[in-house]
Amino acid sequence: MASGRAQVRARLAVPRCYVGEARFEKGLAAFAHRDGIEVVHRSFELDPNRTPRETTPVIDMIAKKYGRTREEAQAMEEHVASTAHAEGLEHRTEGREHGNTFDIHRLLHLAKARGLQDELLTRAYRLNFAEERSIFDPDVPAAAADSAVH
């Protein structure tokens, strides 16, 4: 039987990671030796110089970061959304925020200690990309963590 460790960086505000995580899980589920694989999620904090509750609309962040117009940034976001939809994931392109991910990563480490990291990671991706709730509002991830426990 094969055994090994797969390390995955959790970038909770990056849509390609949202899609990549879904693809990874599908592939892993189809792997004959899945039981011999330990998946280790590594935190990757985004915008560490930003204060924890300071956010920017995603489209504005993309435009600034990549030197694009708002229309080009919107088109980029819509392209990623179509990729997500092709994987069966919901992805909204309006109303999302971008900010520092330190607090949600702290919760993920706590969840790991309790054996609930995968569930909370999936929930955090869903909150950020599919639902009209912000992972940058401290009450939202805390409620998600509470629901993972109960």
Image (cartoon, rainbow, N blue to C red):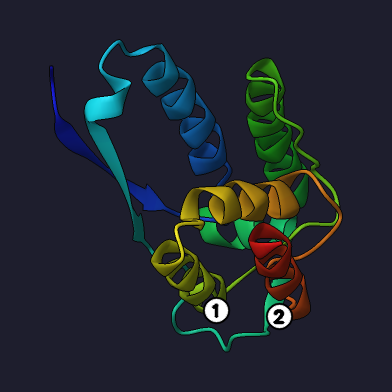
**Left or right: 18 as drawn, with respect to 39:** right
Mark 2 or mark 1, earlier in chain:
1
In the image, is residue 21 above or below residue 82? below
User: Residue lying furthest bottom in this view?
Assistant: 51
Cβ–Cβ below 8 Å for labels 2 and 1? yes
If the image is split into quadrants, where does the C terminus sit? bottom right
Viewer-side residue, 92 vs 39: 39
Q: Residues within 10 Å of mark 1 (few under 14, many from 20)?
A: some
User: Where is residue 142 shown, x and y percent of the image?
Assistant: 69, 75
In the image, is residue 76 above or below residue 64? above
User: Where is residue 20 shown, x and y percent of the image?
Assistant: 47, 32
Residue under the point 67% across and 83% down:
54
Residue under the point 60% across and 62% down:
64
Q: Which residue is mark 1?
A: 103
**Left or right: 145 as drawn, with respect to 104:** right
Per the model, the C-alpha gap separating discs 2 and 1 is 8 Å
Q: Which residue is mark 2?
A: 138
Residue 5 visible, this orientation: yes
**Left or right: 67 as drawn, with respect to 33:** right
Residue under the point 78% across and 43% down:
130
In the image, is residue 49 above or below residue 85? below
* Residue 75: quadrant of the picture: top right
Q: Residues within 10 Å of mark 2 (few under 14, many from 20)?
A: few
Query: Mark 2 falls on what kind of element?
Result: loop
If the image is split into quadrants, where does the N terminus sit? top left
Residue 45 visible, this orientation: no
